[in-house]
Image: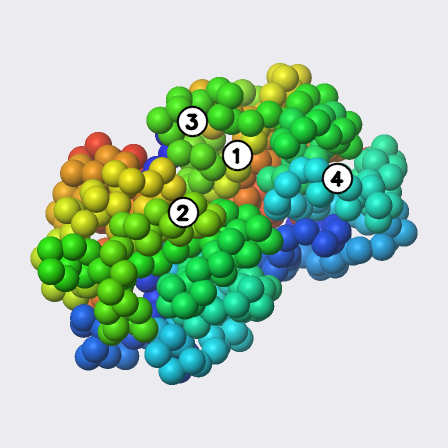
Amino acid sequence: MITKRIIPCLDVRDGRVVKGVNFLDVKDVDSPVALGSYYSSAGADELVFYDITASVEGRKLFTDILREVASTIFIPLTVGGGINTVDDFDRVLKCGADKVSVNSGAIANPSLIDEAAKRYGDQCVVLSVDMKRVDGEFHVFAKGGTQDTGMEALSWIKQGVDRGAGELVINSIDTDGVRGGFDIEMLQAVCDIVSVPVIASGGAGCEEDFVELFKSIPTIDAGLAASIFHFGDVKIEHLKETLAAAGIPMRIVR
Amino acid sequence: MDNVQPRISIIDYGVGNLFSLASSFTSVGADVEIISDPAQVANAQRIILPGVGAFGDAIDKLRSTGMADAVISATSDGVPLLGICLGMQLLFDVSYEYGEHKGLGLIPGAVRPIAEVIDPALKIPHIGWNALHFVRDDNPLFAEVNEGDHVYFVHSYYAADCEESLVATTDYSVELTAAVARGNVYGCQFHPEKSGEIGLRIVRAFCGEGFVRC
């Protein structure tokens, strides 16, 4: 049976891993290479590596950092941040990324999803969506979660999957950084309308939040978090043991 | 590992990205060369046939570049070959991915859509970490891998009708082919270069003394 995935997210700025609370108050944490390697040994099933400043300031990813990460860590690696063109896909894939996550770039130019899926395959294209409740519906936010696009999120997600996105990262701005648990209602709404893998992001504060996620939404594929892993509040080895004991299929690294 | 650094030749025929694959072999101490000229295949010690994307495009590129003939010739000379993911599927007689395509014919069997056999409620592609179930325990490539160890899969097609060469399967509502071997020709449906420490044990094994031209 395929296992549920636990994914630490490494938000990177100036070659360092950072994590903003509600995307604003950014703190320095550690080196991407050291953290990535640590997580890989600890049993992380995948790593997500975002250049968080890229979409705000148009900065390019630090591809030599990426190359260093990818040459020392042999688990699947998703890269995002500043991906606006198929050439951007090419650039990060050549540096060792397995999947590429698009967000603002796809909002500005939705056909980027089609072009990339056609060239690299659906499995390579991850649509990352920052969502927030606005006037009783879910809206898509752009530019690192700072700008309300006014777009209704579920129809955007459907469109993205129809265009060829092979996986979704759903980040709830409402719960991000709050550590009160994943946004079950929002995630369920997404899982109800798509059949591609869905990665839950935003809100995890403790092990029980992951248990609740996988128990509440059996079709969710993965749980993603950053600061709780970086600061050691939740240890991945222990989290996976807890989930396995709760009956969730897990890859346990011995 | 011998005193002489093992040399790994990764076939580059214009599909997919070889960075992680090359890095994984470098990390276990191998001398990795990426080869795109069929003439280099004849001198290879160990060959890796990678691949992502569609079977039809891949086999066309292998044939048009002369790589298909070079690979078949090298394996008949006893050079160990490991096909990974689509590279494993290319080893079979035929694939039914978008039509019908003749493969390299190094291992008897056919490549078919997993949609034909799995529980329709399951997602396609079969993507993520899944456990290996060994139907043979004596394969040197998996000497350091145990029953139930997890490896990373990404695929929508699977190798069927290959019982004679089957080494391991994985459970996705049905048992799907995970690894095959026939003489000096080996194949993994999963990605050893993305399967963490377990994957590196396979990478390391392929660099070992058991895998030399016979």
Q: Earlier in the sequence, mark 1 or mark 3?
A: 1
Residue B182 image offset from top left, x and y in percent: 71, 26
Which quadrant of the structure image shows residue A102?
bottom left
> Label 1 is found on which chain of the structure?
B
User: Are tags 3 and 2 found on a single chain?
Assistant: no
Mark 2 falls on what kind of element?
helix
Residue A157 image offset from top left, x and y in percent: 33, 51
Q: Is residue B42 left or right of residue A234?
A: right
Which quadrant of the structure image shows residue A147?
bottom left
- Label annotation for residue B59: 4
User: Are tags 1 and 4 found on a single chain?
Assistant: yes
The residue identified by callout 1 is: B156
CA distance separating discs 1 and 2: 17 Å
> Label 3 is found on which chain of the structure?
B
Q: Nearer the viewer, residue B137 or A235?
A: A235
Dot 1 amino acid type: Ser
Point 15% across, 46% down: residue: A185
CA distance separating discs 4 and 3: 27 Å
CA distance separating discs 4 and 2: 28 Å
- Label annotation for residue A161: 2
CA distance separating discs 3 and 2: 23 Å
Mark 1 falls on what kind of element?
loop
